[in-house]
Amino acid sequence: MTTLPPPSAKKLGLVIDLDTCVGCHACAVACKEWNDGGEFGPLPDEHAYGKEPFGVWFNRVHTYEVRGTGNAEQGTARSGDMTVHFPRSCLHCETPACVTVCPTGASYKRAEDGIVLVDADKCIGCKLCSWACPYGAREYSEVRGVMQKCTLCVDRIYNETFDEYDRQPACVMACPTRARHFGDLGDPQSKVSQLVAARDGYDLMPELGYKPVNKYLPPRPRRDGCGSAATVSAKDENVDFSTASPLLRWIDKVLSR
Amino acid sequence: MHPALSVIFFTVVSGCGYGLLFATGIVLLLDPILFGRGETLCLLALGGAMAAAGLGSSLLHLGQPQRAWRAFSQWRSSWLSREGIAAMLSFAPLLALAWLSWRGDASDATRVVAGVLVLGALITVFCTARIYTSLPTIPAWHNAYVLPGYLLLGLLGGLAVLLAISAWSAPVWSSRDEMERLIVPWVDHMLVQWVCAALIAPLALAAAVLKLAYWRHLEAPPRVSIETATGLGRFGAVRSVEAPHTEQNYLTHEMGFQLARKHAQPLRRISLVLLVAVPLPLALLLLLPDLASQYWIGAGGAAVIASSILAGTFVERWLFFAEARHVVMLYYGAQGR
C-alpha cells in the first residue's frame, strides 16, 4: 500500500555527525558489502571492472568546501573555511513522496517503525519514486530491473541471532569515527534524540516538506583561529619564550645566536 | 532530466490520441451520424491505436513490464496509477462507441457513450500531467504552466488529426449525379474542417503564449540551493569539491542530463515554429471557403498542419524533459533550478 500509514510512535533513523565524519567511505563500502548479501540484495554492478563501472550503492559520501564568512583577501584562507564530508543516504522521511507516487504498492513505509522499503517482487521499475526523492536515496538496478534503496539494515537491526551490539545498520558499525548513530528518533528520551537536541541537529531541504527522520549534526565551531592562515603565520613569528621552561629558554638562546 | 524516448513518445502520441478521441467524442455527442460509418470507425480506431501505442511505449520504459498490471492498484495515492486506470477505462466507451457507430446507432445511447469517452480522455491526459506536476523535486514540472500545456497540446494534436482525416475523407465527385448524392456529407466535412481550423488557430496561439510564459518562469530564481540541500549555508558559501564517485551513477545519468543553453534556444524556436508559425497561417487559410473546398488544398493543408503540430509537440516534450533539473543534482554541485 502506497498510502502512508498513520505516523508511527517509533521512528528509526540515523543521526550523521558532520563534525566527525572524515570522508573515509567506510560506511558506503560496509553498506554495499552487507546489503549485497542481505535479504534485499544483491546490489549488482554493471561491468564492475570495465571502463565505466556503474552500480547501485545506498550510501554516497560527498565532500564540500565551505567558504567562511570571516574577512580575508581573495584566494587566501579565511576564518571559518572548512572542508565537510557529507554522507548521503535514505532519510526515511515521515512524508515520503517516493512511497505515495508508487503505482504498484512496491514502495511502502512500515507502520511499526517508519522504515521505507521497496518490495523487489512487486516493483515494475518505472523509476518514478527516484524522481520523487530529493535526496537521491533510490538507485535503479539495470540488472535486476527494479528500484533499490537503503533498508536501514532491517535484516540486521531485528536479527535475534546477532549480539545486541551488532543489531545496528552496517554503516553505523563500520564508521571509525562514530559519525553515524542509529536509534529511535520518535522517542525524545533516546540517545539519538538527545544528541540531536544537544547539537542542533537539522533536516536537509526542509522547504520541500518531506520531513526527513534522519538528522544531520552541524560541524562544531573550529577552535580559535585554528586553520586560518593569519593565526598560523602569527604563531610562527612571535613565540613568547619568557614563560617557557629553562631548557627551552636555553635552546632558544643557543639557536638565536 | 534524461529525455527517455519511450516516455516522450508515450506522452506525445497518447496525448494526441486522447485529444483525437476527445474531439471525435464531441462530434459524435453533437451529431452521432455526422460522419459515415467508415470514417467514424477510422477516427475511433486511430485514436485508440495512438493511445495504445503510447501506453505500449511506456511499457518499454519499465524494468519489469510483465508486472505492469500491478500499476492499477495504488489509485488512492499515485497519479501514475490513476493515469493507467483512466487510460484503460477509456477503452470501454471507445469500444462501445465503435460498436454503436458500426450499427449506425443515432440514438441518445451513442451521445451518452460519446460523452463518457470525452470525459475519460480528458481525465487521462489530466492524470498524465499530474504525474509530472506533483513532483516538487523538479521545479520545472512543479508549476501551474505544465497541466494546461499537456491539455492544450493534446487537444491541439487531436484537432489537427481530426482535421486531416476529415479533409482526406471528404467526398470528391466526377459527375453531376454523384455531386447531388454527396453534397450533404461534403457539407458536413467542410463544417468539421472549418470548426477544427477555427479552433486550431487560437489554440496554437494560446500554446505559444503558454510556452513562452513557461520558459520565462524557468528563469525564476530557484527555491532550493546547495546551501539548503546540505544545511551548511549557515557557515558560508558551499561548493562541491569532490563527488562520491569518479564515474557516472544512476542519479547523474537519470537526473543529471545537461542541455547546453545554446542548444535550448534554437530548439525552443523550432518548437514554436512547428506548433504555431506553420499551422496558424495554414489554419487561417483553411477558413476561406474558396480554398478549403478544393480537395487537394484542404487535404494537403490539413496534412501539413497535423504533422507540424505533432513534430512540434515532440520537440516541446523533449525540451520539457531535457530542460528540467532535479534538486538532487545540487548535491553534485549543480547550481539552481
Image (tube, coloured by chain):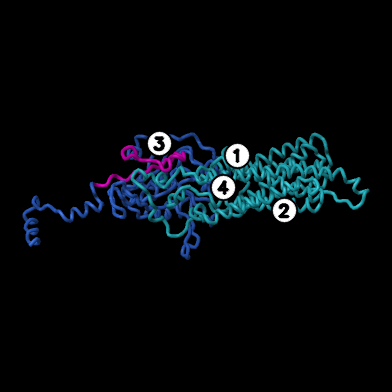
Q: Real-space Cα distance between discs 4 and 3?
A: 29 Å
Comparing labels 3 and 2, the label whose residue is closer to the camera: 2
Q: Real-space Cα distance between discs 3 and 1?
A: 30 Å
Q: Residue A122 shows which numbered tag?
A: 4
Comparing labels 1 and 2, the label whose residue is closer to the camera: 2
Which numbered disc flags the more N-terminal residue, 1 or 2?
1
User: The C terminus of chain A is located in which quarter?
Assistant: bottom left
Picture colour for chain A: blue
Q: Give the range drawn in magenta.
A: A196-223
Q: Position of residue B276 (x, y in %)?
A: 66, 48
To the question of a shared chain for discs 4 and 3, the answer is: yes
Q: Which of A217 and B208 is in front in this view?
A: B208
Which residue position holds label 1?
B75
Chain letter for the cyan part: B
**Which chain does the residue under circle 2 lie in?**
B
Q: Residue B304 shows which numbered tag?
A: 2
Residue B278 forms part of the magenta stretch: no
Q: Real-space Cα distance between discs 4 and 2?
A: 45 Å
